[in-house]
Amino acid sequence: MPNEQQKAEARERFQRSMVQAQLGDLLGMISGHETDLLSFDDVAKHLRARQQVEMGTQMVRLDRIVGSVGRYRDFTRTFLPRAGANQERWTRLDAAMNALEGFPPIELFKIGEVYFVRDGNHRVSVARANGATHIEAYVTEVKTDVPLTLDDFERDQWLIKAEYAEFLGQTHLDKLRPDHDLKITEPGRYALVLDHIKVHHYLRNLDLERTGRKKRLNWEEAVTSWYDNVYMPIVEAIRRSDLLEQFPERTEADLYLWIAYHRERLAREYELAPLDAETSVATFAQVYSDKPLQRTLKNLRFGLHWLTANDKPLGMTTEDFQAYRARHDAGEISLAEANERQALHA
């Protein structure tokens, strides 16, 4: 049985841990870093993980436990207790641990290299607060086709990997264009790429219909057509301009999406036909840069341009501007306009 000193030390340890949790949450709010545990249900849903395999009892590293099934808001990402934690249970477990009584194995789900608490959040919290490195656990592995590491969860890259796997499942781009390198560094962006492919599919079939052709592109043909005729021309223009050097830690696919948005904005603001790859990249490069001094100067020029010379986009010649305007007047529409028409016909 724990003695009175061990019980007092347990209460004191709980209070210290609560203060550390509050400070960590405050720093997280300031820095933008996520401090919550991950929700097992959210992760499993994104990964479409269903098959479970019982792995038995084993010793598990505490720093590989990153989430919980139902109590993920009661503890921080490092299992410091918040207000939702049960103080009486926590201190009782802490005192028992220091009285060398121990406690039964916790229950964990395993996905990739990481674990989620099925039962035993307070025991994990107590073990970490006492400097333990491992804990005994009954482990159930949840199978997924997405390879996940501890680092993916520390940097929240798991969501991007899950979205990428879903994107490939819908497009089969890994089979249609095995050498592709369409990697994105922000979550939620693969859905935008999928929208681009759907709109391209709609526009190409519209063109075929206008020319009187009976054949229509199927989905896989639309994916390869978009990749070869929309995505890669912009990527090749990015490479020729060395634009990626201005955006450290970004990818060509990141830039493609930014440039596509930039192109749509210009088309909407100036009533232009879609810009070709070279013009899209050139006008984008005139305005944006990740280097602070260049970004400040270019944004200043862009702002002044909009205030004092709102006749054509920065970086575009008068001749090109007039040509794009004429093509728009003749019926060429932007992706946004095509998307609106597609929605009306859906």
Image (cartoon, helix red, strand yellow):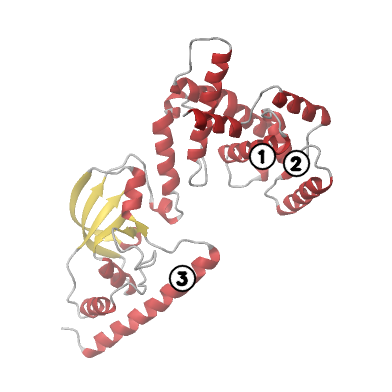
Q: Which mark is residue 251?
A: none
Q: Is residue 42 above or below residue 85?
A: above
Mark nearer the N terminus (2 vs 1): 1
What residue did someone put label 3 on? 24
Q: Is residue 2 above or below residue 57?
A: below
In front here: 304 or 173? 304
Q: Is residue 103 above or below residue 268?
A: below
Q: Amino acid at mark 3?
A: Gly
Q: Amino acid at mark 1?
A: Arg
What is the count of numbered marks?
A: 3
Q: Is residue 239 above or below residue 307?
A: above
Residue in the picture at 75% in, 28% down: 325
Q: Which mark is residue 265?
A: 1
CA gap between label 3 and label 2 equals 41 Å
Q: Are marks 3 and 2 in contact (CB under 8 Å)?
A: no
Badge 3 marks a residue whose secondary structure is helix
Please tell me how crowded label 3 is: few (under 14), some (14-19), or many (20+) other residues with Cα within 10 Å: some
Tell us which disc is closer to us: 1 or 3: 1
In front here: 170 or 342? 342
Tell us which disc is closer to us: 2 or 1: 1
Q: Amino acid at mark 2?
A: Gln
